[in-house]
């Protein structure tokens, strides 16, 4: 992972971070019904589960950012995403609430970070035993949101393709039955 140079990249990085909520809202617009819970090949999480995992990750990030700014070299832990997705009932939660929770938390986190000084971006912590900085954590958070938003878009496309293929197969079956009658 490239650690951003706070003097050169921080404004761009903050903007990428801030736009995460808008990005999630855009990629989930119009998603409903069975599409929310579809898991295609190569997609371990559904749209709904992905959004809730991001919302919970942002809640944890809120505490991590506070610790990083208030404490000297805090020990941070990443969340066990597969366990959280499996055990926290994401499949039962409303998508719109997850998107709004993420947007609210991301806005709150952005407000915490936007006026920091250059030295603050060099503050360090240990994440899962690996040294990191505030700037690197921000870069990772922005990249995670962008990557998962892309996965949501691809998953929605896979759902639409699977639905179209199923409809096409039903049409072929109906046509074949009609041809046999004739």
Image (cartoon, rainbow, N blue to C red):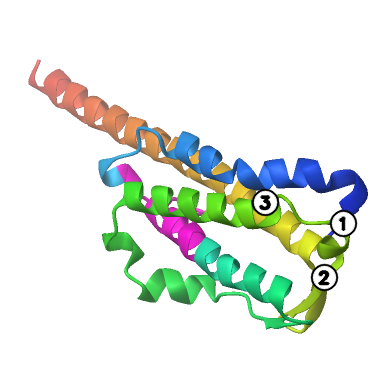
Q: Secondary structure at mark 1?
A: helix
Q: Secondary structure at mark 3?
A: helix
Q: Nearer the viewer, residue 137 or 157?
A: 137
Residue shown at the point (70%, 76%) measured from the top left: 70
**Residue 118, disc:** 1
Note whether residue 44 is visible.
no
N-terminal-most mark, 1 or 3: 1
Left or right of 38, for residue 63? right
**Residue 22, disc:** none
| Residue beneath disc 2 | 123
**Residue 142, disc:** 3
User: How far apart are the two marked residues, 1 and 3, measured between alpha carbons?
Assistant: 19 Å
Residue shown at the point (82%, 61%) measured from the top left: 121
Front label number (3 vs 2): 2
Q: Nearer the viewer, residue 84 or 182?
A: 84
Q: Where is residue 164? Give x, y as percent.
A: 34, 30
Residue shown at the point (39%, 72%) measured from the top left: 86
Q: Are marks 3 and 2 in contact (CB under 8 Å)?
A: no
Check disc 1: other Cα within 10 Å, few if <14, some if 14-19, many if 20+: few
Q: Establish if 121 lies above or below 129.
A: above
User: How far apart are the two marked residues, 3 and 2, measured between alpha carbons?
Assistant: 18 Å
Q: Where is residue 69? Give x, y as percent.
A: 72, 71
Q: Secondary structure at mark 2?
A: loop
């Amino acid at each position: 992972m490239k650690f951003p140079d706070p003097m050169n990249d921080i404004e761009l990085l903050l903007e990428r971070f801030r736009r995460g909520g808008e990005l999630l809202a855009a990629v989930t617009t119009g998603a409903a019904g069975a599409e929310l819970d579809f898991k295609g090949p190569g997609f371990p999480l559904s749209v709904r589960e992905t959004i809730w995992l991001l919302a919970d990750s942002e809640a944890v990030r809120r505490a991590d950012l506070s610790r990083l700014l208030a404490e000297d070299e805090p020990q941070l832990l990443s969340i066990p995403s597969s366990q959280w997705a499996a055990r926290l009932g994401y499949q039962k939660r409303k998508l719109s609430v997850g998107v709004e929770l993420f947007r609210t938390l991301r806005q709150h986190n952005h407000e915490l970070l936007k006026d920091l000084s250059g030295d603050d971006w060099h503050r360090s912590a240990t994440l899962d035993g690996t040294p990191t900085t505030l700037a690197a954590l921000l870069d990772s958070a922005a990249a995670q949101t962008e990557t998962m938003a892309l996965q949501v878009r691809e998953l929605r496309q896979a759902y639409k393709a699977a639905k179209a293929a199923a409809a096409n197969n039903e049409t072929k079956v109906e046509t074949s039955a009609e041809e046999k009658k004739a």
